[in-house]
Image: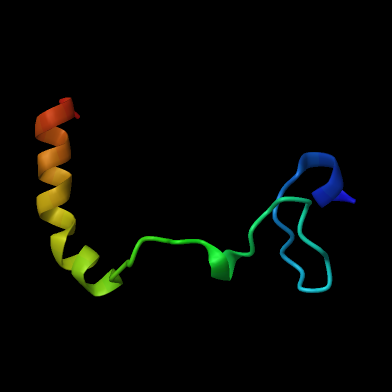
Amino acid sequence: MIVDLVHSYPVRSDVDLPDGAQGLAELDLVDYDPVRAGEMRDAVSKEFAKRYGV
C-alpha cells in the first residue's frame, strides 16, 4: 500500500516495484570502498571545512 501511495521502493521482496521503476540491481551506483573512505576521512573533512567555513 505504501509503495502505491508514495511511490517508494519496497523493502520487502514479496512487494512489486511501482510502474516504471528499476530494480536496485539494475541501477548504476557508485563503486564505494569503505576502507578507502575511512582512510580519506580526515583529509575530506578538512577540505570541506576549508571550502565552506565550517
Residue at x 10% of width, y 41% of height: 47
Q: How many marks?
A: 0
Residue at x 56% of width, y 70% of height: 25
Q: Hey, which quadrant is residue 52 in on the image?
A: top left
> Quick check: 22 left or right of 36?
right
> Quick check: 21 left or right of 16?
left
Residue 46 image offset from top left, x and y in percent:
11, 43
Residue at x 29% of width, y 70% of height: 34
Residue 26 image offset from top left, x and y in percent:
55, 66
- Extreme-top residue of the structure: 53
Residue 42 image offset from top left, x and y in percent:
13, 54
Residue 9 image offset from top left, x and y in percent:
70, 55
Q: Hey, which quadrant is residue 24 in on the image?
A: bottom right
- Extreme-front residue of the structure: 20
Q: On the rendered image, what quadrant is the C terminus found in?
A: top left
Residue at x 9% of width, y 52% of height: 43
- Camera-side residue: 2 or 4? 4
Name the image colouring. Answer: rainbow
Q: Is residue 35 above or below residue 53?
A: below
- Camera-side residue: 27 or 53? 27
- Camera-side residue: 19 or 1? 19
Q: Hey, which quadrant is residue 53 in on the image?
A: top left
> Quick check: 44 left or right of 7?
left
